[in-house]
Amino acid sequence: MKRKILHGILLLTVFFDLFVGFKVLDSSAATDPNGVDYAILSAFTRAIQVIRKDYVDENAVSYKKLTYNGLKAMLIHLDPHSQFLEPGDLKDREDDTRGEFGGFGVTISRRDQNITVIATMENSPSARAGILPGDQIVGVEGKSTINMSIDELNQKLRGQPSQKLTVSIYRPSTKETKDFQLQREMIKVPSVVDAKILDPVQSGGSRIGYVRITEFTEPTASELSEKLDMLQGQGMQALIIDLRFNPGGLLTSAVDVTGLFLPPKTIVAYTEGRDAAQRREYVTGKDVKQRPNFPIVILANSMSASGAEVVTGALKDLKRAIIVGETTFGKGVVQSPFPLPDGSALWLTVAKYFTPGKQVIQEHGIAPDIRATMDSDQEHALALRQRGGLLTPDEQKLVRESSDTQLGRAVDALRGLIIYRQYAKQ
């Protein structure tokens, strides 16, 4: 498939060369033996030349703009997940999957038209400089952020480690503006967070562990393994894995996570593409530390997607976990990067993946064993609780007054299993 894509791009390049000066391409031979439709490609490149010559705004019709916009439209119309990535976007995506990037360790959001610091990471350049949640970023390198989007500002804040940047901060509490010269460092973003033994009051005296996986990056399985060691050292009897709002990430990472709870060489997912020969099976590793067979509940909701669905589907099909919550998102396709000569790339859907029980995930999702829903206020409160950092008074009130009913159902299920196992041993 990669060869066909590159072949098509090369053909387009040839056509661009042929059409400069409005040379006419002979399209009498509609297709070649490989199925390339020269007549359609001729129409496409002819349209680009017409636009470049006759469109009213000459600055809007460079080859780069027209080609990039055309490629974006092509990918969008294939499926919701395929994308065209401009130069640099692929590196940002790879940085995200590695769980680290060059930056200042600051989380920002737009509040009342101001770009506000929501949180700073512990021991990050922003925290050491004294930047606080609630501060407003009003300028970067002397340029105002008034009309700057969050994405644009994040692009400026991220970059090569060791580079310095001057950030202008306004602090509403003191009404002072101050310039901070910050030096980027490699920021490591943990994907396994909030690991703890639940409060005995909440768990009815049982020692129930809880971990939340925010996404699946390269170090996720090793991070989770460390957290499990800690929880087992504290006498954990059962475990809740919270995958709510987890958008997925690396398929291989999701497979490695399931391997922490399943026997070696167990099939946890498989993919199928256009050709039957493209079928690929994903199995657990053979050298993974084996854990006790403690009861597990996975918390999932309608925003649990992709890799989160692989883990949920595998542990459900293989009878290793009970699923509590809602039917998951239903994103069961695999994307692969296809770099192009100018540094841009195609992020293309190449296969669909299935659970060990041969259930298709795409557009279906994984149904829970125990259905537990939340209203919009409860979901909003959960998202705020998970995000942490700066909250407005109204947000603090919402978090305080909203209960996590899904977590409550998960605790009830595990308490029942723990009691049943205790009775079975008597």
Image (spheres, rainbow, N blue to C red):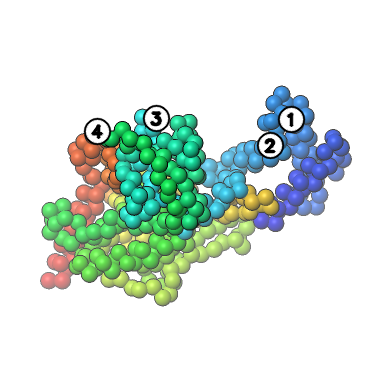
Between discs 1 and 3, the one toward the N terminus: 1
Residue 67 shows in the view: no
Q: Residue at x 26, y 63 (%)?
A: 295
Residue type at numbered disc 4: Asp
Q: Under tag 4, what secondary structure?
A: helix
Residue 108: image quadrant is top left
Q: Nearer the viewer, mark 3 or mark 2?
A: 3
Residue type at numbered disc 1: Ile
User: Residue beneath label 1, please?
Assistant: 51
Q: Nearer the viewer, residue 15 or 260?
A: 15
Between discs 2 and 1, the one toward the N terminus: 1
Q: Under tag 3, what secondary structure?
A: loop
Q: CA distance from mark 1 to mark 3?
A: 37 Å
In this rendering, the answer to whether 377 lies above or below 184 is above
Q: Nearer the viewer, mark 4 or mark 3?
A: 3
User: Residue beneath label 3, please?
Assistant: 113
245 horizontally vs 421: left or right:
right
Say whether marks 3 and 2 touch (CB < 8 Å).
Answer: no
In this rendering, the answer to whether 179 lies above or below 312 is above
Say whether marks 4 and 1 touch (CB < 8 Å).
Answer: no
